Amino acid sequence: MLRFLAGTMTMDVIESVRVFANDRELEVRWWQMHDPARAQRTFEARIEPEALRRNDAYCRLRFDVARTVTPAKEWPGKADTRSLAIYFFWLEISPDESA
């Protein structure tokens, strides 16, 4: 089981989060535990055994979003020119208790 709390600067980016394990897309569910204006969500996804079998050495996680945000372009007066996607407060991987 994969769980993580992530955030971003805009709602459209957090709504576009997709998660992959060894290039296999995971079914992700989420819940909003924080102020929605802050664009933070807790996500949960089960990593299927088929995804883990694709590589015996490791499990590569990939997090995709529809776009990045450049604060200087989004909000006048901001000097930050970095391209930002999501940030993580925490991420945990644990055995799937439902299996």
Image (cartoon, grey):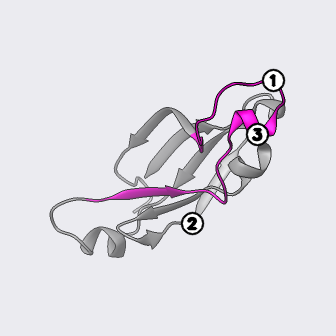
Q: Main secondary structure of the magenta part?
A: loop
Residue range (magenta): 59-86
Measure the C-alpha gap from mark 3 to mark 1.
Answer: 9 Å
Mark 1 is on which residue type? Gly
Measure the C-alpha gap from mark 3 to mark 2.
Answer: 32 Å
The residue carrying mark 2 is 27
- Determine whether, in the image, residue 61 is placed left or right of residue 89: left
Image position, residue 9 (x, y; %): 72, 36
Which one is in front, 63 or 32? 63
* Residue 73, label in figure: 3
Q: Residue at x 74, y 29 (%)?
A: 34
Which one is in front, 49 or 22? 22
Q: Residue at x 27, y 75 (%)?
A: 54
Which one is in front, 16 or 44? 16
Image position, residue 43 (x, y; %): 59, 47
The residue carrying mark 1 is 77
The kind of secondary structure element at disc 1 is loop
Q: Is residue 66 magenta?
A: yes
